[in-house]
Amino acid sequence: MYSLLLTIIYLAFISLGLPDSLVGAGWPVMHQDLGVPQSFAGILTMIIAIGTIFSSLASERMTRRFGAGLVTAVSVGLTATALFGFSFASEFWMLCLWAIPYGLGAGAVDAALNNYVALHYAARHMNWLHSFWGVGASISPLIMSHALTSGMGWPGAYNVVGIIQVILTVVLVLTLPLWGKVNTLTPSGAHLTEVDASPGSSEASASRTAHLPLKQVIRIPGVLLVLLAFFAYCALENTSILWATTYLAGDRGVNPATAAAFASFFLLGITGGRFLAGFFADRVGDRTLIRGGFLLVGLGGLMLLLPMETHAVALAGLALAGLGSAPIYPAIIHSTPANFGRQHSHAIIGIQMAAAYLGSTLMPPLFGALSSWVGLWLFPIFILFLAAMGLVFSERLNRLVDAR
């Protein structure tokens, strides 16, 4: 039972990653077919981000009422509907319309699954969960590439991913009874047990606690610290993904093809690093993973900053920054119940998701504006600042929790 439910959760996170890179992979063709400027991709991603933030904040209330399984199934179904809508869109405004349910579905399933795994599974599973997101995000550009080269066109890619989401929705609906089982860690964290969600169980108890308004959650000591640390991490991750190639080619003079290849190593470092972190996450603990991750990102940023004639150090620094980034997101999420209590975890994780999307939405354009003013050389300094910000606030949270 435990393994079957975990497999379904992994599949759900692959499906969460699948649509995330479809817009970027298909946009060079999509904007031409739709007759809009290339820059309009920002409008589309902004609408998706707004919907994701809204549903992340509402996720706790919905999950308390309907349960994590049903919320996940409905959210995946909503995303599937939006993807089919994308495939039939013949005008840009139609894409904008379908981007609304797309964002709403993605945010709800993200927060619900992250909280469920944080409550009921060991740290290794949280790392592997986010590694599977990377698998989905890596597969969808291949689907788009096949659709474009086979004559299906970009609508065909959205149809394929939509069909995958529909299949997963059916699987989730058929396996809803599994979510009534609560997997809890022993106090030592040595192994997992499976118990019924009876009135005395942790999940049942958590569901009976009152919904926490946003203002009340923010006032919980330490919540602002973890939100700022999470904001900083997601900002540096997405700024690196968007601007690393431009920095390497435009400021360091790296061949564009080589720069693009090594920029992909940043994502590969995140995906592979999360898979590897799963094997020792339970032994070293979330705090060590977060601290070590930010320090590795900082070291990678320093390697990017060094004014050396060879490009090898800068390229290796970018790959190292990706490896350091790998465990930070899962560890922050997984440590939430321990830091703030199981009864508060879902409300706080929902707000963390919102902070994550704010960081990933606002900071890459901010760097773009700054770099056009002062130059692309600012990139490693920008990454170093965000890594330092994340480390400082996460360490302050640790001291606050220890003091309690």
Image: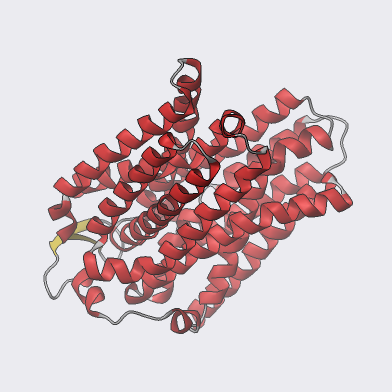
The quarter holding residue 319 reads top right
Apparent side of residue 251 relative to residue 171 in the rendered image (left or right):
right
User: Quick one: 68 or 2, which is closer to the camera?
Assistant: 68
Residue at 20% from the left image edge and 42% from the top image edge: 171
Q: Is residue 187 visible?
A: no
- Relative horizontal placement of residue 261, taking residue 161 as reference (left or right): right
Tell me the residue at 67%/31% (across/down).
262
Residue 260, image x and y in percent? 68, 29
Could you say where residue 118 lies in the image, as x and y percent from the top left?
35, 60
User: Taking 244 as reference, is 202 above or below it?
Assistant: below
Name the residue rendered at 30%, 56% in the picture: 121
Quarter of the rendering containing residue 132: top left
Is 53 drawn above or below residue 165 in the view shown?
below
In the image shown, does 131 or 71 lie closer to the viewer? Answer: 71
Is 121 or 177 nearer to us in this picture?
A: 177
Q: Is residue 376 rendered to the left or right of residue 148?
A: right
Q: Position of residue 135 (x, y in %)?
A: 43, 36
